[in-house]
Image: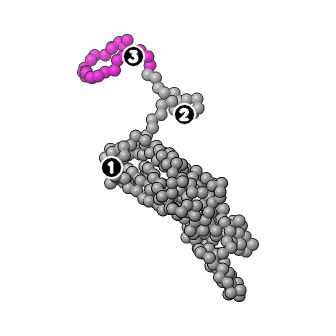
Amino acid sequence: MVKIEKKIVSYQVKEDLPQASTAPEQKPEPATDGSSQTQIAEKPVPEGGATIVQMHEKVLRPDMLVGSTYKIKTPVSEHAFYVTINDMVLNPKTPYEKRRPFEIFINSKNMDHYQWISALTLIISAVFRKGGDATFLVKELQSVFDPKGGYFKKGGKFVPSLVAEIGDAIETHMKMIGMIKDNELDVHQQALVDAKRAEYDAAQKSSAEADGDNPVDGNFPAGASLCNKCNNLSAVMMDGCLTCLNCGDSKCG
């Protein structure tokens, strides 16, 4: 109870006054682990108050999706495989517009792999629709090895299995839409690789002219070994060190 001892000269009526409480105001105290008990998650709000739509499992499929199809021709199958990845365009016509994979289909005349390919497409599509970072699928698929052995595809890259090549197609697509950053060589690294390639080709050409042979077969010299970093037949011995003519990886640093 407060006793007023001075003369009242004016007053004001306030609406929606909170109910009086005899208890003092409680303020959040810091937790013992150093974090505050009251945490407010601040989310960036775009201009105009619009809501940024993220990919999640409750997003409804639109009538039209934007897709790309990748052809896979392997020596383990007479018929080619066609990998189609359809994307949903989120936040169209805004600065936050982006494409995210929504579903995947794999078709082929070869029916020998129909069962596991159907299961794989269902699982991958479910992961796409779940949202979040789905780039982990690439490494998981690329690490699958065929017990019968892998093969080299055009360009000299080693592929351990058909599943791994499907992972390569997904990686190519994710790089195209910006989900995976393409770690290309910078200007200085590319210049070093080109210089090493020119040096090696010159040495091999001189040796070939003396022997009357052609040392080059395809994109990289004949006799090149497999690079453990980029999986290409592009590693050659230079200056006593195994050096990759594709990605620049070297055992000498």
**Residue 196: image location, x then y, percent:** 64, 75
> In front here: 194 or 26?
194
Whether 96 is among the magenta residues is: no
What residue appears at the point 59 percent right and 74 percent down from the top-left corner? 219
Q: Quadrant of the C terminus?
A: bottom right
Say which residue label 2 marks: 35
Q: Residue shown at 60%/68% (left/top)?
A: 156
Labels 2, 1: front one: 1
**Above or below, 13 relative to 176:** above
176 relative to 120, above or below: below
Q: Position of residue 74 (x, y in %)?
A: 55, 63
Seen from the viewer's position, the closer of residues 128 and 212 is: 212
Looking at the rendered image, the disc whose residue lies closer to the viewer, 2 or 3, is: 2
Residue at (67, 84) in percent of width and height: 213
Earlier along the polypeptide chain: callout 3 or callout 1? 3
Q: Are marks 2 and 3 in contact (CB under 8 Å)?
A: no
Where does residue 176 sit, x and y in percent of width and height?
46, 60
Mark carried by residue 63: 1
Query: Residue type at mark 3?
Result: Ser
Q: Which residues are magenta?
A: 1-24
Query: Are dots 2 and 1 in contact, CB under 8 Å?
Result: no
Disc 3 crowd, CA 10 A, few/some/many (<14, 14-19, 20+): few
- What element does badge 1 sit on? loop
Residue 228 percent coordinates (x, y)? 66, 62
**Residue at x 41% of width, y 53% of height:** 87
Within-10-Å neighbours for mark 1: few <14, some 14–19, many 20+: few
Let me know if residue 149 appears in the view: yes
Q: Which mark is residue 177?
A: none
Task: Report whether residue 45 is seen.
Answer: no
Of callouts 2 and 1, the N-terminal one: 2
Please give the residue where the numbered disc 3 appears in the rendered image: 21
